Image (cartoon, rainbow, N blue to C red):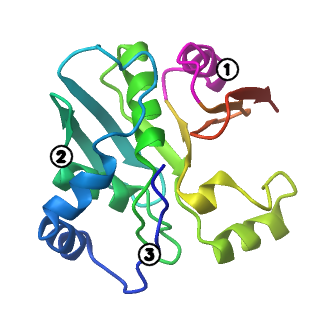
Amino acid sequence: MNRPSEKSAMLSRRGALGLIGGAVTLVAAPTAHAAAPAILTGAGDVRRVHLVNKRTWEEVNTVYWVEGEYIPEAKAEIDFLLRDWRENLIIDFDIKSVDILAGVYRLLETSEPLGVVSGYRSPATNAMLRRKNRGVAKDSYHTKGMAVDFQMKTRGARGIANVARQLGAGGVGSYRTFLHIDSGPVRSWRR
């Protein structure tokens, strides 16, 4: 599993891509052997995600894995979109979580982007959200870069959850207006 590390400097998208692009071999090496959900194993030569951040309206529609290799520049764009936008903190988001998102996206057979409500949360952001909402976990997978909350215009959270559970990977939480996925132990819940 990849352990996220916070980058303390405030980075623009272009600046982040430039920094990460310069370290192509460093980024590719640790993620090349990440376990993928069963739906992605042998499912073709590419993995893709189409995401839009519902807070910043940034969009990523990219192939991030080709023929067994992760594409560092595409992963950097995904990391940027999933950053803690409140503090503009970018981490190396857990690749297994991205693979789970890709698996859900593939199973949904859609071209509609997954609308990201929450990706990475710094401990400070998570604590602030916890003060406002008792449903926010103290030791949230969001603070580890291992969870994404998302929604779609054309499909409800419970329907997407049924699809996500087919992967048999990580946590799947169905809430009234969004779906939570994470790369922790396999489990599911509804609220």
Spatial distance from mark 2 to mark 3, Cα to Cα?
Answer: 23 Å
Residue 165 part of the magenta segment: yes
Q: Which residue sits at x=62%, y=14%?
A: 162
Where residue 31 sits: x, y (%)? 32, 48
Q: What residue is pinned by disc 3?
A: 88
Q: State the residue at coordinates (62%, 21%).
A: 161
**In the structure shown, which secondary structural element does the residue marked by tag 1 occupy?**
helix
Relative side of 148 to 174, left or right: left
Instruction: Please identify the quadrant where the C terminus is shown.
Output: top right
Label 2 belongs to which residue? 71
Of marks 1 and 2, the one in the foreground: 2
Upstream in sequence: badge 3 or badge 1: 3
Report, in whole angstroms, how far the alpha carbon at label 3 lies from the one at label 1. Answer: 31 Å
Side (left or right) of 119 relative to 71: right
Position of 105 relative to 132 (above/below) = above
Amino acid carrying mark 3 in the image? Asn
Please tell me whether residue 117 is drawn above or below residue 169 in the rendered image: below
Q: Which residue lies furthest to the bottom in this view?
A: 9
In the image, residue 4 above or below residue 123 = above
The magenta-colored residue range is: 153-169
Is residue 77 visible in this depiction of the protein?
A: no
Find residue 27 and report its image quarter: bottom left
- The residue located at (33%, 39%) in the rendering is 33
x and y, in percent, of residue 14 in the image: 18, 71
Q: Residue 158 carries which label?
A: 1
**What kind of residue is marked 2?**
Ile
